[in-house]
Amino acid sequence: MTIARQLAEILLRGMCEQSYWNPLEDPPCQSPLDDPLRKGANTKTYTLTRKARVYSGENIFCPQENTEEALLLLLISESMANRDAVLSRIPEHKSDRLISLQSASVVYDLLTIALGRRGQYEMLSECLERAMKFAFEEFHLWYQFALSLMAAGKSARAVKVLKECIRLKPDDATIPLLAAKLCMGSLHWLEEAEKFAKTVVDAGEKTSEFKAKGYLALGLTYSLQATDASLRGMQEVLQRKALLAFQRAHSLSPTDHQAAFYLALQLAISRQIPEALGYVRQALQLQGDDANSLHLLALLLSAQKHYHDALNIIDMALSEYPENFILLFSKVKLESLCRGPDEALLTCKHMLQIWKSCYNLTNPSDSGRGSSLLDRTIADRRQLNTITLPDFSDPETVSDSSSSSSSFSRTESPLHLFVSSHLHSHPKPDTFVWPPAARSVSDPGPRQEPSLCNSPEVYFHGFPSLFSVSSVHATSVAASRVEQALSEVASSLQSSTPKQGPLHPWMTLAQIWLHAAEVYIGIGKPAEATACTQEAANLFPMSHNVLYMRGQVAELRGNIEEARRWYEEALSISPTHVKSMQRLALILHQLGRYSLAEKILRDAVQVNSTAHEVWNGLGEVLQAQGNDAAATECFLTALELEASSPAVPFTIIPRVL
């Protein structure tokens, strides 16, 4: 075992791919690493005195490069270490047990190096799970196991293993911080995250250097809990706690850009826009190219109705992070407001191109027609409103090869100078030209709301996603799991070909199509919106966001009853989807069912008290019932909230440790 392990170590640490040769081949006459210009004394001739023995039969494996051979040797060594393990705890066997543990630990450390290089974290976690027979009171093996589970995406098990690591090493503050990070992520165990964060905060002087991070984790936990809270009073209490925790973190670590950024983000969520601008400026001074800080600055500018400046900031951020889909989604919304729907559709097409380049996947439900949708509709931007789509129900429809290339203007000045200039001065409000589709909050006519992209690394627009852990509600977590299961069942009924790989890329693709559909709805083109929505439905047919978009299309066509059914189906999957609640209440208002509409809108206000569309709708319902005083209060609240409402909700920005 020792010789095999040492050879594996040489292969991993002392040999590169260029100097490796296959065991079945003769060694090269000289090393590929030798200098061809220097011949003579330093040139070595490689010869073998003993030929390799060749076996024949089934299931015979021969490594082709150094990492494969090292991994084969290490797996053999691991098998031998497990076979010869000394596990007895009696004093007479202590020295043998320590030798056995040391040998096994070295093997598993080398396995971590070999498998980590190839990204084989699932296999690594299985190997380290076998090492648990050696791990009694051994922190190193427990911690390696926890890290491998994290890398393999097994967050729930990783948290349990990290609890054991905390017991073995209670003075190490990095372990509860790591556990809190996992709990705030896809698990959404906010109460557990709060406990871990308080462990760091209350640890005393032993972990004083990590106390700022502890307060940061605590603030993030409170902020996410405030988003989950169903009562406005509880939301306000938790938001105040989050602000205090972020302020404490910022005071303990004034040079940490994350502390300043999250303090600014929490102020923005609380609609304290001027104060948030001050702290995001500090964050950018500390870390001028941070994508989240730039994104927050853009949203703060959009909240002040400086949409062109916000779009310029997004463009600058995308020049540094061209594959950041969250920035691109915000760009679609801002371009719809500033440059018109044609530019927004170009960005949607650009996102599809990025998606194809990032993920080498094949959409099993894609017949080739959907990918040409945006090409067809933006091929002639000058005649956008007159373009008609092909019949997507026709299987013989062929893709059009003509398309417009997407070009985005870039500001030539350095990023930090550009950002600094917009932090100190803003154009006057009258420089903004409202698009024709924009309406006043008090306008009772139909209108289109901005996309509610308030979801987490876990859930973005209702889909679990790699983007951000932000504003998901506890009910949305359950709802998204339900819709994922229902979508898988529905997809299996439509096609026997499953989606390849992890779900995150497909959720991103569905989001791109939903954003394109929203742009088409905004310009009154139901056929194109239906086609885009169908592309998303092919991926996740039971997503509440897809059902909501179908309701929007039905409303655009004037089919009120059909729209109502779609909204009710969306709410049956996600009962706290505010946009579905608001549109359903609007339909009920039109049908004269004022009491039910009022009930739904009051529930929506409890879920999201900053949604000005909901307050406006509640005012209209109360006014129709003759309650003018309460309606006036609702209209005033709606106007106040609209004045500080960003183009995209602040909670689109990830809240992760």
Image (tube, grey):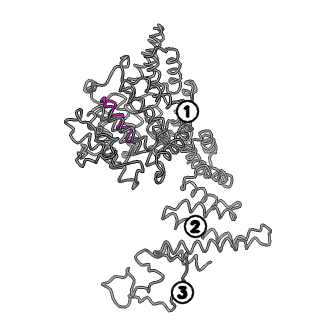
Q: Is residue 205 visible?
A: yes
Taking the spot 25% from the left edge, 43% from the top edge, the residue there is: 408
Extreme residue toward the bottom, this view: 49
Q: Nearer the viewer, residue 328 or 260?
A: 328
Q: Are marks 2 and 1 in contact (CB under 8 Å)?
A: no
Task: Report the amino acid beneath label 3.
Answer: Arg
Residue 109 tag number: 2
Does 523 appear in magenta? yes
Q: Is residue 156 above or below residue 1?
A: above
Q: Residue at x 68, y 55 (%)?
A: 168
Other-residue count near label 2 (Cα within 10 Å), few / some / many at <14 / 14–19 / ≥20: some
Tag 1 residue: 228
Q: Nearer the viewer, residue 285 or 656?
A: 656
Per the rendered image, the range of residues in magenta is 512-526
Identify whether 548 is placed above or below 620.
below
Q: CA distance from mark 3 to mark 2?
A: 30 Å
Expressed as whole percent of the image width and height from the top left, the position of residue 35 reads 34, 82
Ranked by sequence position, the earlier of labels 2 and 1 is 2
Residue under label 3: 53
Do callouts 1 and 3 mark residues in contact (Cβ within 8 Å)? no
Residue 553, image quadrant: top left
Q: Secondary structure at mark 3?
A: loop
Expressed as whole percent of the image width and height from the top left, the position of residue 172 reads 62, 52
Q: CA distance from mark 1 to mark 3?
A: 65 Å
- Dot 3: within a 10 Å radius of its alpha carbon, few (fewer than 14), some, or many (20 or more) residues? few
Rendering coords of residue 193 (x, y %): 60, 42
The chief SS type of the magenta part is helix
